[in-house]
Image: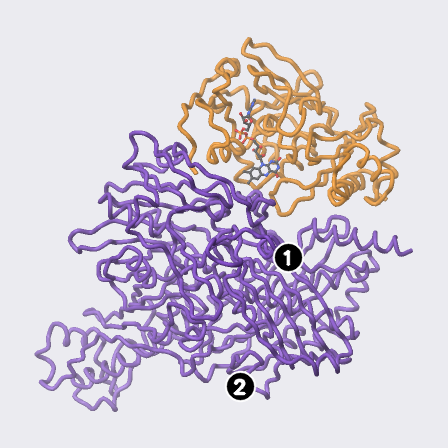
Chain colours: A orange, B purple
Amino acid sequence: MKPAAFEHLRPDTADAVAGLLSPEAKVIAGGQSLGPMLNLRLARPARLVGLGAVASLRDIREENGMIVLGAAVSHARIEDGDSPVALPPMLRHVARGIAYRAVRNRGTIGGSLAHADPAADWIAALTALGAQIVLRSAAGTDRRVAMPGFVQGAYRTALGPDEIIAAVEVPAAMRDALWGYDKLCRKVGEFADAIGAVALHPASGHVRLVSGATGAGPLVLAEAGADLARSARHPGSPALRDALAAALPGTDPVKLRLLATALSRAIAKVLPA
Amino acid sequence: MTSGIGARVPRKEDARHLNGKAQFVGDIKIAGCWEAAFVRSPLAHARLRGIAKPAGFEDRVFTAEDMADLRPIRCESTLPSYKVSDYPALASGKVRHVGECIAICIAPTRAEAEDLAEAVAVDLEPLVPIAGIDTALGPDAPRVHEDWDDNLFLTTRHDGDLSGAKARAAVVIERSYETARQAMNPMEGKGVLAHWDHRADQLVVHTSTQVPHLIRTGLSDCLGLDQAQVRVIAPDVGGGFGYKCVLQPEELSVSWVARRTGRAIRWTEDRREHLTAGANTRQHRYKLTAYADGEGRLLGLDADIWVDVGAYSVWPFTACLEAAQAGGNLPGPYDLGAYACRTYSVATNKPGFTPYRGVARPGVCFAMELTLDAIARAVGKDPLEVRCLNLVQGAAMPYTNVTGKYYDSGDYPAAARAAGEMIGADTFRARKEAAAAEGRLIGLGYACFTEQSAHGTKVFAAWGLPMVPGYEQAMVKLAPSGAVEIRSGNHSFGQGLETTIAQVACDWLKLDISRVKVTMGDTGLTPYSTGAYASRGMVMAGGAVSKASEELARRLRLHGAHLLQCEPEETEIRDGAVWKGQASASFAEIADAWYLHPDRLPEDVDTAGLEVTEGYKPDIDTGLFTYATHAAIVEVDPESGRTQILDYVIFEDCGRRVNPMILEGQSYGGAAQGIGSALFEETLYDGAAQPLTSTLADYILPGPAELPHFRLGHSETPSPHSRHGIKGVGEGAAIAPAGAIVNAINDALAPLGAELTRIPATPHRVLGAILDASAAREAAE
Ligand SMILES: Cc1cc2nc3c(=O)[nH]c(=O)nc-3n(C[C@H](O)[C@H](O)[C@H](O)COP(=O)(O)OP(=O)(O)OC[C@H]3O[C@@H](n4cnc5c(N)ncnc54)[C@H](O)[C@@H]3O)c2cc1C
């Protein structure tokens, strides 16, 4: 399959990128999700606006207690810790489990969030870490949307028609978080069948248990989930099973069990038996 | 000599592949070549009411109506009850599967051709889709082919008398099994580039095929050209596996358009086309009843086998090879007692069935091997012991089995025991208990099979196919430089034949392999061959090269003796020369004398010269039987359903090994494909026969991380019937993995009371079986 014809623009500021957006235009970052969709002609924008020339979107810095990752930072850079400021270990671990290296070299954190594949890793991991997404509009103004609120369902986000993702902000305290991440997938580098993501930061009272790859957006199981966590180290645990079944009505029992397994394994990394 | 039979010679073809210099159809450059894209059916079953070409582009879009002079692919068979179907290059009247070609569009680039394809308006009236066997055989089923009175391409029966087995059986095992539909996924899909060569007055067709000479025959028939007016060239081919051993509708359309327009036209299959229109293999269903005595000895087997063969019969193998082979091969390496079997080749709205590496036997082996384990569990014996009891014993060789297969040589139980030893069968139970104590589920499984290779004239004639292979020909000649050239109409597309047939020549001519040039796959340059399929390449092309090389060696000694002024009987060949004592005439000198300085030869020189073409087939037509036992140890994670292969052993006997390194590669590759069938690969359909797995994100192929480190063991029982004792081995390793792995999974799951009978054994299926078993247990309590 070859894509339908399109025009390719590469402006050099984030505002200019946002300014070029229209119903006929689409941002392209690493092209690892959009590329296949163009080839299959499932996406057929008349114009592609590339992020490659916007240097600021590749910045990583620390500001006001937040680690700020530019939207066009690649999975590979996060995996390698190729950053002027230390990255939370959980980010590096999650990056390493996305696809395989060739895809990670090009795929970006912003692209993954904007695409919002329900089985993707970042939407779940960043929810557990309490990240917020910085959206830049054509007018040059920024707004911030916290995870998981940024993801509104499968492939649906809070992005407005004239907005792009400029950056992702992760609380710097998450460097010290206790975390667990478990991804069940059919082969190395595949999208997940189930994700469990847990981050605890007792000092700031941050407790997040997240079930990912549910078919919709990431599911936060009770902000104050410590009790659940303690009882949920076995995937067969009724507490966990009931919590998932209640939150995901209509999900088939095998899928529920996979979600429970991933979550309980993530928890076990934080609270060993 | 290091390059002869038995040497681990590096592959001649690898340098160009590793340097990116190989020439696949997509790499060929012909000035003015345009690209083609197909309009394909979005529906599985529909009446084709009309096709509207985009205005202004009428001469760039072609439909069946334009190609009235093109005959459909029509594959006859003389088997009783067989029904013939027309397989048109472009749909006419009706479409019968998603992805069926409706129109071909040409443009300077593929992207533009696809733009054009999108602009073609196709008017389809949906018909009730036949998505599977049950619908097809239902009482009011619509017909795939309207002039038929049911949806069966063929039924076969083998009516053995089971009354004795039934009367004496201590154990009766009944099981149903299913294997998924698959796509073969060669790295390079189909590809064809055709143009008319005015100088040669020939249609020249470059196509990614295993069987160039057959394609020439088939193309000429359909296009109404004399075969001399068609030259088919199979350049580098990126994997075949059976996918490319049949005449392709796209080969017809592209050739027709090239001839009509006077342009070079190329089409290359993309992965989505492959995964939808190419999902054409492996889908079987079994219902077996096995009768055994209290020791686990098989007394009889009763079987029904259904194959979902899709809509069309492929040329030249028909839609029925699969089911016929399944019925014939189900007994496998076992001594069954009585056997009754009925097979049904069921027409559905899916792509036409094509034989894939192992042909029928991966399904058959899966069904048989799971049944043997069920018997072993029922009689409380070790599965390996039950196998050894039932396998045809070494002392019984040669042996004619219950379906008339002639097992030429070997010791099947010895291979099974050797595999058991390699995998550590005697200590496994202790290992399993230790794992269980840690809460881990591990299991051991076996699968045994025979691989009928290079079956020939009588076998194919009995199937009544339009093509019956006979004598394979090869040319071996001495170049004026003293180098050796081999020409074979067979083809090398990853199996290493380019290297191994050169080794056979080296064996006779005592040359280093660098002095041997091999040309294959071009009907303009090579003697006729029906091509590479049925594990026949090494036996047949190798045998033909052997025979021709032997004759060339004889003539070299004749000519050499002239130059050495002695008798031919006094000479010997070594180091690229003919020797008498200390004196020698190099091949270069002998060639120079014959081609350029005949003044050095006597008047009565043998004028047959130094170019030899010979035809060869083994002493028997019934095939040479390679055999093996695979053994696997797996761990099943009961919380995720994931299976991890902890150890994998293959013990095989394929007669004389021509190049052990290449053989290992064949084993790894075949086993990898078998593991794909066992655990990963599946073309899923919805109720409307729409394929749901149209990209590699949905159709999961195993990757390096999913494959175990295969451990191989060998014995060598040369076939008494082939040159050098060679047996075929190309398909074998793909046959057994599903049986071995699912038996191992079932062994691991036995404590939970779960049993799998369907592949692929995906985590979802394994976990589902575990949850079902535990629900059943709870209900019972
Ligand atoms: C073989 C393969 C395996 C994969 N496996 C995994 C996996 O295991 N886990 C996983 O999470 N992902 C996986 N992916 C997806 C991968 O992570 C992609 O990199 C990611 O989904 C998209 O990032 P991208 O930069 O390539 O975005 P693109 O493909 O360029 O764009 C994706 C979408 O986001 C939009 N977009 C991109 N950047 C922005 C922005 N800054 N602002 C607004 N919109 C934007 C685009 O318009 C487009 O709609 C896999 C991909 C492949 C090809």
| Image quadrant in which you'd find residue B84 | bottom left
Q: Residue at x 48, y 24 (%)?
A: A52
Left or right of residue B551: residue B454:
right
- Name the spot of residue A122 as percent of width and height, x first: 65, 31
Residue A236, position in %: x, y?
Answer: 83, 45
Mark 2 belongs to chain: B
**Circle 2: element type:** loop
Instruction: Look at the picture and state if A17 lies above or below B746.
Output: above
- Residue holding disc 1: B759
CA neighbours of label 2 inside 10 A, class few (<14), some (14 to 19), many (20+): some
* Ligand 1 image position (quadrant): top right
- Residue furthest right in the image: B781
Subunit ID for the residue under disc 1: B
- Residue type for callout 1: Ile
Residue at 38% across / 72% down in the picture? B468
Question: Between disc 2 and disc 1, whose residue precedes?
Answer: 2
Label 2, label 1: how far apart the Cα atoms are: 34 Å
The residue identified by callout 2 is B398
* Amino acid type for the residue under numbered disc 2: Pro
- Residue at image point 42% right, 78% down: B458
Q: Nearer the viewer, residue B50 or B315?
A: B50
On the question of residue B413 being in view, the answer is no
Of B704 and B726, the residue lying toward us: B726
